[in-house]
Image: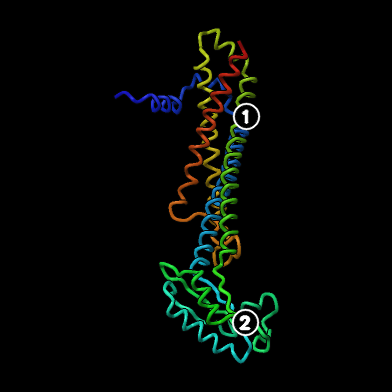
Amino acid sequence: MKLPKPLARAAALLSSDARADRVVPPSGHTAWLTSFTAGAMTFLCVFALALSLASGRLASRWSDALARTATIRLSAPPEQMQAQTEAILALLATTPGVESARALTDEENRALLAPWFGADLPVEELPLPRLIEVTEADPGYDGEGLRQRLAAEAPGAVLDDHTRWRRPLAEAAGRLRLLGWLSIVLIGTAMAAMVTLAANASLAANAQVVRVLRLVGADDHYIARAFVRRFTLRAFAGAGAGALAGLIGIMILPRTDAAGGFLTGLGFSGAGWLLPFLLPPLAGAVAFFATRHAALSKLREFR
């Protein structure tokens, strides 16, 4: 059965050729440089990929949570506070798109202010506004219509639908994702450059061997294939080790209950754990094209 040309080329690349392998030395600085570069770049790429995916998930989770809730801040004289609060709750109970509403207790207000003023803040003695938490149904409520009804029932009530909080989160997530993908592109470019330099150095070190091979009838593609195969396999092996190290690093990060702030949710989830396993083949492909281009260009210089 005859294989298609792409598969035939891949099989020829992976098949061992002892005579051609002698063209490329099995050890030396080009060997460890290629493997180390591929491993280090893949290790960094795993974290860049995790950062890009996690930032999107984190911002989406925060944005969704804020989108489903709103807050009504009521400022009124102490003798009118309870009556206006009950009027607002009765209004919200008849508002389409509002799933539930409740007034926050003094203990909840104290917990909200504790990070800034401490846990012993005398909330009941301060003229703080009353906060009412509103949970949105699906479909949601008409924000502008609700503001007008609140103005009629309680002039001191202000509806905050958290739009000003969601917009910065969405912008930050988009920029973090962009930086993550840009980092991956830069890492791949740097790896291609390093592999190209290693291939050129190996070819230059074996210039005499190349000339002898030409004298005995070897063409440039035969010689280049030896370099391409050796450097591609080196890059693939190094990238595999780097991807494994990156996955271990991701797994030992603090868990969601132990980490706070941005670290919460950093990593992969679900099928995303399979993405790092795509990096070694990609690194091998980058090494293949970079080495092939470098080898053919260098061989033309030897003519």
Pointer 2 residue: 75
Where is residue 73 drawn, in percent x and y? 59, 77
**Farthest right residue in view:** 117
Residue 114 vertical position relative to residue 254 in the rendered view, above or below: below
The residue at the point 60 percent across, 80 percent down is 156
Count residues near mark 1 (Cα–Cα under 10 Å), then give few for <14, some for 14-19, many for 20+: many
Query: From the viewer's perspective, is residue 280 above or below residue 226?
Result: below
Q: Quadrant of residue 125?
A: bottom right
Distance from disc 1 to disc 2, alpha carbons, whole Å, reads 72 Å
Numbered disc 2: secondary structure: loop
**Residue at the spot of label 1:** 30
Residue at 62 percent across and 16 percent down: it is: 207
Q: Residue at x 44, y 74 (%)?
A: 98
| Image quadrant where one finds the C terminus | top right
Give x and y (percent) for residue 194.
63, 32
Residue under the point 52% across and 25% down: 228
Amino acid type of the residue that numbered disc 1 sits on in the rendered structure: Thr
Q: Is residue 275 left or right of 195 when viewed as pictured?
A: left
Q: Amino acid at mark 2?
A: Ser
- Please identify the residue farthest to the left as the structure is shown: 1
Q: How many marks?
A: 2
The nearer-to-camera label among 1 and 2 is 2
